[in-house]
Amino acid sequence: MERAFFTRAPNDSELLSLRRFLATYRDGSGGQREADGSSRADSRQIERCLAELLYGRTTENKSFYDFVIESNESGGIAVRGASIKSKQLELDADSLDAGKAMRAHLEISNSNSKDWKLCAAHGLSQRDFGDAQHAATFGRLILERQIADREQAETNYVTQQDADVKRTFITKESIFISVLYTPPRKKDGERQWMVSAFPINLPPPVRWEFRTERSLVGYDEDGGALYEWYGLSGSQFKYFPKLASRLHGTGLFTLPKPAVETLRAKSSKMFEG
């Protein structure tokens, strides 16, 4: 299966389509309101744009994967998934061109009950976390839980489909998609966007250390923060892969800007009387 972001960078036509898909939500229908009265796509709408571009099907739930792509291969159906994470972030074209160690920001999960149930089963407590004890064990368990959630999502998807058709989830060809967008520019209020794909398999860090009483950090070989887990603050687990390590992606791009249409005006066009 050949598909943009999964196996290659998007071509010019695909990038134009993606820009237009995202731009449709600038007319006031986007889930996020902008200061100038327009809007932008929220996270679920971004998922739908990418699924539409890649002929995928959104899961429309809190599954590990936000959309899947099915293709007929080797007498059955091969399934590949994408988990999409979006984030506002300062992006500088000169820094990107210079190959500096800029990173994507992906919040993978925030399941406080699951995380602490797992930790308790291994004899670890919130007091241990607050006292900065057992960093390596905490880190290993929380990273393993992310992997277990992905594996369970793959199993659930396959078992919930037609049992008469053989489906196989191709994990090694599934991906994270990072969608980064800058704050509005002062001169015109426009944002720049960048989309990147990373392997779905989470790499192990070199070491785990407590950075503060609230955060546990997994460091990579360069000494940079690869993971952060905020065990006592909502249990957010974040992943920061280097943009230089991405599989495929785009450069910085902007979106067309359609006219903003109020809900009253739009409804009057759609319905008579």
Image (cartoon, rainbow, N blue to C red):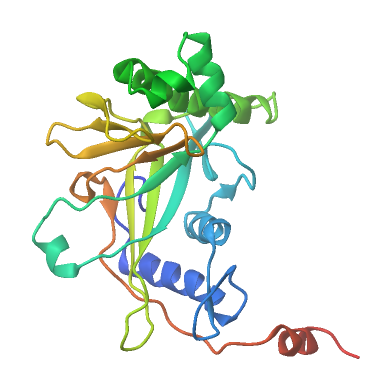
Q: The C terminus lies in which quarter of the figure? A: bottom right
> Left or right of 219: which side holds 236?
right
Residue 13 seen in this snapshot: yes
Residue drawn at the location 53% of the way across and 67% of the way down: 41
Q: Is residue 167 visible?
A: no
- Tell me the quarter of the picture where residue 164 sits: top right
- Rendered residue at 49%/75% (across/down): 23
- On the image, which quarter does residue 113 sit in? top right
Is residue 12 placed above or below 259 in the rendered structure?
above
Q: Quick one: 96 or 187, which is closer to the camera?
A: 187
Relative to residue 262, is residue 33 depicted above or below?
Answer: above
Tell me residue 176's x, y (percent).
39, 43
Q: Is residue 105 left or right of residue 65?
A: left
Query: Residue, x 37% and y 81% (percent of image)?
Result: 190
Instruction: Residue 208 in the image: state x and y as whole percent.
Output: 26, 25
Residue 107: x and y in percent read 43, 44
